[in-house]
Amino acid sequence: MATSSDVYDDVAVWDISLPDGKHTVRFQHGTTSGRRVIIVDDEEIRNTGWQFKLVGREFFDIGKYKACVIIEANGLNYNYILEVDGKSLKKFVENKRKACRIWLPVVNGQRHRVVLEKDSLDVWVDGEKLDVMGEFTENGTETAFAVDGDSAVIRAITSGKRREGIIYNLFINNLQIPDAVENE
């Protein structure tokens, strides 16, 4: 038996990086039937079936974030827009880039993804949120945890400059890990 993703083509595909990992959102739209299918990370999460209305909005979740695909008519064509937490994907990604620090250390031959959400101080390793607590030090705070069994710590210190704010650095086995480039 063929699934909906086997029969219909994607009309829009978006890749989005969140603290719990990278996600792919695929959208299928039957422009004669009105049918709408949303697939997140290869799992079909919404299938409306036949509908009269060809334009509109479809709401769904990507982890803890609320998302919406907006379908707009543009003459004989359609435009598809992804919003996350009420913002365009571009604006949401810009805000997340400012609110998170991401590192991609290689530990014991394996690449890992470490994310710090600066607003909540939540730490994620390979898509799993850790139960950690920062401790105050003479120079700021330190949040200790492990990455693949090796000791890791995120050190937060003040930059001394109002515009720069707090500087976050990740150390694994006392070696500083460089920040990741977002598209890595």
Image (cartoon, grey):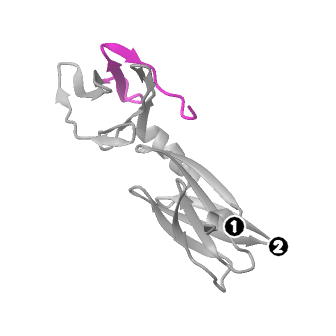
Instruction: State yes or no: residue 152 in magenta.
Output: no
Can you give x and y, in whole percent of width and height, for residue 149 in the image? 28, 24
**Looking at the image, is 83 positioned above or below residue 156?**
below
Identify the image quadrant of residue 63: bottom left
- Which of 13 and 178 lies nearest the eye of the viewer? 13
Kindly identify the amino acid type of the residue bearing the numbered disc 2.
Leu
Identify the image quadrant of residue 101: top left
Magenta range: 156-184
Instruction: State yes or no: residue 168 in magenta.
Output: yes
**Looking at the image, is 48 positioned above or below residue 69?**
below
- Which of 183 and 110 lies nearest the eye of the viewer? 110
Can you give x and y, in whole percent of width and height, for residue 162 in the image? 37, 29
- The residue lying at 23 percent from left, 24 percent from top is 140
Q: Residues within 10 Å of mark 2 (few under 14, many from 20)?
A: few
- Any part of residue 160 in sight: no
Can you give x and y, in whole percent of width and height, for residue 4 in the image? 62, 68
Q: Which mark is residue 76?
A: 2
- The residue lying at 55 percent from left, 50 percent from top is 91
